[in-house]
Each structure stands twice: as structure tokens, then as C-alpha cells.
Amino acid sequence: MDLQLSGRVAVVTGASKGIGLAITRTLLEEGVRVVAASRKGNADLDTLAGENLVHVPVDLMDPEAPGQVVARAVEVFGGLDILVNNAGGPPPGVQLPRMSFMTPTDDDWREMFEFNLFSTVRAIRAAIPLMLERGGGAIVNISSGSARQPAPMNVDYNAAKAGMNNLTKALSEEFGPQGIRVNTVSPGPVLTAWWTKEGGAADIIAGMAGTDRDSVMASVAPEMMKLTTGRLVDPQEIADVVALLVSPRSASTTGAEFAVDSGFLKAV
Ligand SMILES: NC(=O)c1ccc[n+]([C@@H]2O[C@H](COP(=O)([O-])OP(=O)(O)OC[C@H]3O[C@@H](n4cnc5c(N)ncnc54)[C@H](OP(=O)(O)O)[C@@H]3O)[C@@H](O)[C@H]2O)c1
């Protein structure tokens, strides 16, 4: 299927690792020109280097940063058609899961909302006038299944992502008539550094369950989270859905949420 994306311009946040890296690679393969934002570049991003990729090193905790990233799309590629708000998860220096509502302080809540919701709000605020100039655009916000199915852990993260789901719908209503589509993709647990790195989620759960990191990823986490497929999600499986959603082939899809979650959500 031709996704009709060749020559379009995208901003992808959190583009150097995990889901964002897979999204960046997939969009480049479809001929999209990509502005990739993360604090640092790395060898994985370097493998994608070429005339269609620009890396912008920014810390999205800085309120000015989302607007600067969007502005780079205009400077380098002349406009903006696609925005993927992917950066999120534990703010810099934070390890999740945190197991109780009583754990995060006011500062923790603020940081969580800055990273997962406010940076998205700021990027969208900068992107919308540019998309309107081009007669429309597509925005995808990467949320989480835990926005809909909260558990007694990561309460601040879940609340920020629930806010993102609500924001997506509101934006789709306001700007749909002007050609901007806004959708959410909600991953379940995905095999990225968040889980796999030293001291990451798999290590924390392994410590609680008295097992090791590999066992957590292979069986403990899928069982604990009642994943229907029995395995964690591959980042490429998120990227493929994002590519379809930002494509004109999805012209009638807006205000929608797509779960790519191994069957994590059980509600109808
Ligand atoms: N992995 C999961 O299980 C899972 C589940 C549900 C939802 N999600 C959502 O999926 C999205 C991506 O998660 P992921 O697991 O792919 O993350 P990841 O592998 O940890 O990658 C995070 C990306 O964001 C960048 N980043 C981190 N802090 C940043 C900052 N302050 N400013 C700019 N960039 C920053 C990182 O690069 P630098 O470190 O160089 O900045 C990296 O490119 C997040 O929104 C997350 O909430 C993930």
C-alpha cells in the first residue's frame, strides 16, 4: 500500500530510541523528511542520517524547546505536515514503576506533567498555525494503555496520559474542519530501554518478584499484565500504526485511539 507520504515533513519527539526511533525510521522509509528531537544523538540515529533527517538536540522539559523543534521544520524543510508527540515516560532521572500514590511529591507530579503533557501541548500549539498554512496536517500523540486502565502504580504518569487522550479528542473536534487530524496511539508494555536498561522497569519488577530481568520480560510481566498475546510489544508495531495514521489513507480517522497493547485493555 502506498501511504502517499513521500515529501511530507514530520517532527518526531523522543526520536533517538525505542518507539520514536522506529517511527523515525519508518517515516524515512516512506520518503518523509523528518526533524528528530531528543537530548542527544546516538549511533542508532546516525544509521538513519541523510538529507531527509535533521536531529535537533533539545531538552523538552524546557518550555521553549517544543516550539524550537517545530521551527526547525520550517527552517530546514519549509513547513510542517506531521507531528508525532512521542517523547514521554519517566522524566529524566526518574525510574518507573513507582508503586504507590503516596510516593510522588508535588515536584514529581509537576515533572511528569511537564514531560508527558505540557511538552505535547507546546509542540501542538506551535505546529497548528503551520499546518493550517498548508491546508491541514496530522498529529499523533503517543499515550499509554494505563491512561484507560489505571493501577495503583505510576499514578502521576497515568493521569498525564489520560489528559493527553482528552486533549487529542478536543483538538480533533476544533481543528478537524480545517483539515488537521489528531489521533492517539496507546501502547501496552513495549520492549524499549524503559524496560530493558540496567535499573529499568524489568529490573525493578525482578527485584520485587525475586527473579531476573530476562524472565520479567519473557514471562513475568506478560503474566502480571495479563497480555493476551503473551509477549511485550515490539516498537515497530507502534511505528506501523503511526505511519498509517499520519497517511492521507487515514483521511477519515480523527479523534480516535488505537491500542497497540498485546491485549492489555480488556474493556469493550
Ligand atoms: N515502553 C513502554 O513500555 C511504553 C508503554 C506505554 C507508552 N509508552 C510511551 O511511548 C513513548 C516512548 O517511550 P519509549 O519507551 O520508546 O521511550 P525510550 O526508549 O525511553 O526513549 C525515550 C526517547 O525520548 C528522548 N528523551 C528523553 N527525555 C527527553 C527530554 N527531556 N527531552 C527530549 N527528549 C527526551 C530520549 O532521548 P534522550 O535520552 O537522548 O533525550 C529517547 O529518544 C512515551 O511517550 C511513553 O510514555 C511507552
Image: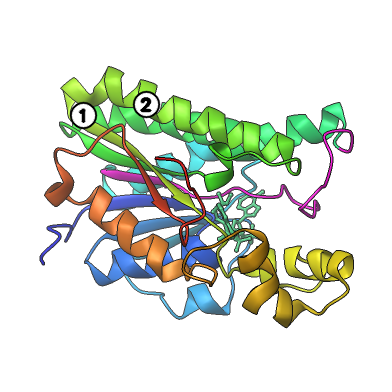
Q: On screen, 230 above or below 7?
A: below
In this view of the protein, can residue 122 be seen by the observer?
A: no
| Secondary element at image label 1 | helix
Would residue 149 be found to the left or right of residue 228 on screen?
Answer: right
User: Do residues under tags 2 and 1 come within 8 Å of each other at their CB atoms?
Assistant: no
Q: Nearer the viewer, residue 244 or 136?
A: 244
107 within the magenta span: no
Residue 30 in the image, given as x and y percentages of width and height: 22, 67
Q: Quadrant of the N terminus?
A: bottom left
Q: Nearer the viewer, residue 258 or 268?
A: 268
**Which quarter of the figure has residue 161?**
top right
In this view of the protein, can residue 236 be seen by the observer?
A: yes
- Which residue appears at 26% of the width and 45% of the height? 78
CA–CA distance in space, label 2 to label 1 = 22 Å
Residue topped by disc 2: 169
Would residue 213 be found to the left or right of residue 242 on screen?
Answer: right
- Ligand 1 shown in quarter: bottom right
The numbered mark at residue 133 is 1
- Which residue appears at 41% of the width and 70% of the height? 236
Give the colour scheme of this rendering.
rainbow
| Secondary element at image label 2 | helix
Callout 2 crowding tier (Cα within 10 Å): few <14, some 14–19, many ≥20: some
**Which quarter of the figure has residue 130?**
top left
The numbered mark at residue 232 is none
* Magenta-tinted stretch: 81-103
Amino acid type, residue under disc 2 in the picture: Lys
